[in-house]
C-alpha cells in the first residue's frame, strides 16, 4: 500500500489566497465609502448638530458618528475577526493601538469643519493594515464624487483611472499643500507659520490646503501638488492616503527626514525624494503626542 504524503500548498498559492481575501475587503471598503458618502451628501443639505471634542475648533457631528457606526457594523458582520481604529471610537475612549491583526483605520468624515460650513471638500477615509503594513486605502471625496483607491503593489486610481504623481523635480516650481490643524497653542501656531514662511520663501509657486488631509494626499497622488506636510494629524487622517500616494509613485517620510510612522501624527508626502527632502529642511518641527499613547 502506497503511503500518501501530506500536501502543503506552495507559498505562491497561499499568497494568492490571502490576496483574494484582501481584495474582497477592499471591494467592501469601496462599497462602504460610497454608501457613507451618500449619507454625508444628504446631511450637507440638512441642519447639523455640531459638538466639540478637544476644543472649540475640533468639531464632530452626528454624521461623523453615524457613518463610523455604519462602517464598523458592516465590517464586523462580514469580517468578525478584524480590528478597528476609528476617529469617533477613539474620541469615545477606545484604545488606539495598531497590532498585527487585520485592522480597519477609519475617518468617517475627514474635513468635518468643511462639512459643517458647506465647504465642498469632505472625504470618507478607510485604510486597511495587516501586520502593521498598509494593504489598501480608499478615500471618497463625497461632494466631488471622486473615489480614490489603491492596493499594495497594484497601483492607485481615481474613478478607475490610474494616478501618477508629478514628475517635477524643482521645488521652486512646485505647489505645496498643508493645513493649520486644530491646535490653537501659540507655540504650535508659531512653528506652523514659521514652516510656511520658510517654504513659501524658497520660493515655491504656492501653498494650498483643502481642509482634508486625505484629499490633500490624493492631490499629491494625482500630480496636482508636489507635496503635502502636516504635524498634528492622526493615523485615521492619513492611513488611506498614504498608500494611495506610494502606489501612485510618491514617497512618504517624517517631517524630520526619518521613515514615515503612521502613529507619529507627522507626515511628508511628496512626488519624489528630492522634493520631500527639500520640504523637510524648511519645517520647524514639533512633536505631538503619539496616537498609540
Image (cartoon, rainbow, N blue to C red):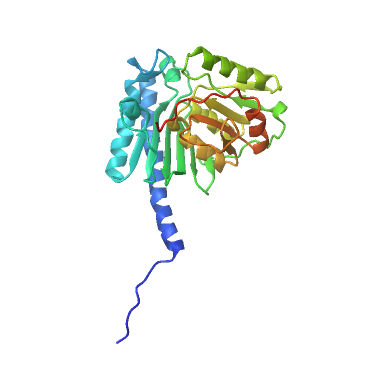
Q: Residue at x 48, y 27 (%)?
A: 144
Question: Residue 165 in the image: x percent, y percent?
Answer: 61, 37
**From where the camera sits, is residue 206 visible?**
yes
Say which quadrant the N terminus sits in. bottom left
Question: Residue 265 in the image: x percent, y percent?
Answer: 48, 29
Question: Residue 105 in the image: x percent, y percent?
Answer: 40, 36
Question: Residue 257 in the image: x percent, y percent?
Answer: 60, 34
Q: Residue at x 32, y 29 (%)?
A: 89
Looking at this view, is 47 or 77 the one in front?
77
Give the left or right position of residue 162, taking residue 43 as reference: right
Say which quadrant the C terminus sits in. top left
Location of residue 277 (image quadrant)? top right
- Label count reads 0
From the viewer's perspective, is residue 62 above or below residue 168?
above
**From where the camera sits, is residue 48 visible?**
no
Kindly give the residue lying farthest to the bottom in the view shown.
Answer: 1
Q: Residue at x 52, y 18 (%)?
A: 180
Q: Residue at x 32, y 26 (%)?
A: 65
From the viewer's perspective, is residue 154 above or below residue 168?
below
From the viewer's perspective, is residue 111 above or below residue 243?
above
Location of residue 201 (image quadrant)? top right
Looking at this view, is 234 or 144 the one in front?
234
Amino acid at each position: 500500500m502506497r503511503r500518501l504524503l501530506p500536501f502543503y500548498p506552495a507559498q505562491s498559492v497561499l499568497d494568492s489566497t490571502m490576496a483574494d481575501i484582501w481584495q474582497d475587503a477592499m471591494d467592501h471598503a469601496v462599497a462602504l465609502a460610497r454608501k457613507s458618502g451618500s449619507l454625508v451628501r444628504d446631511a450637507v443639505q440638512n441642519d447639523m448638530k455640531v459638538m466639540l471634542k478637544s476644543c472649540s475648533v475640533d468639531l464632530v457631528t452626528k454624521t461623523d458618528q453615524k457613518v463610523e457606526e455604519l462602517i464598523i457594523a458592516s465590517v464586523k458582520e462580514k469580517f468578525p475577526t478584524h480590528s478597528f481604529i476609528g476617529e469617533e471610537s477613539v474620541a469615545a475612549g477606545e484604545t488606539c493601538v495598531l497590532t498585527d491583526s487585520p485592522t480597519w483605520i477609519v475617518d468617517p468624515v475627514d474635513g468635518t469643519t468643511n462639512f459643517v460650513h458647506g465647504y465642498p471638500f469632505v472625504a470618507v477615509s478607510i485604510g486597511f493594515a495587516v501586520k502593521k503594513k498598509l494593504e489598501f486605502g480608499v478615500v471618497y471625496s463625497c461632494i466631488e464624487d471622486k473615489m480614490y483607491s489603491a492596493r499594495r503593489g497594484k497601483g492607485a486610481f481615481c474613478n478607475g483611472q490610474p494616478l501618477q504623481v508629478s514628475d517635477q523635480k524643482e521645488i521652486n516650481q512646485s505647489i505645496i499643500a498643508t493645513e493649520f490643524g486644530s491646535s490653537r497653542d501659540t507655540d504650535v501656531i508659531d512653528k506652523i507659520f514659521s514652516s510656511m514662511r520658510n517654504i513659501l520663501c524658497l520660493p515655491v509657486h504656492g501653498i494650498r490646503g483643502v481642509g482634508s488631509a486625505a484629499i490633500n494626499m490624493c492631490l499629491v497622488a494625482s500630480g496636482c501638488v508636489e507635496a503635502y506636510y502636516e504635524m498634528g494629524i492622526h493615523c485615521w487622517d492619513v492611513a488611506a492616503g498614504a498608500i494611495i500616494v506610494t502606489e501612485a509613485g510618491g514617497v512618504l517620510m517624517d517631517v524630520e527626514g526619518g521613515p514615515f510612522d503612521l502613529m507619529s501624527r507627522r507626515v511628508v508626502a511628496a512626488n519624489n525624494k528630492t522634493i520631500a527632502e527639500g520640504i523637510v529642511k524648511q519645517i520647524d518641527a514639533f512633536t505631538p503626542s503619539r496616537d498609540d499613547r
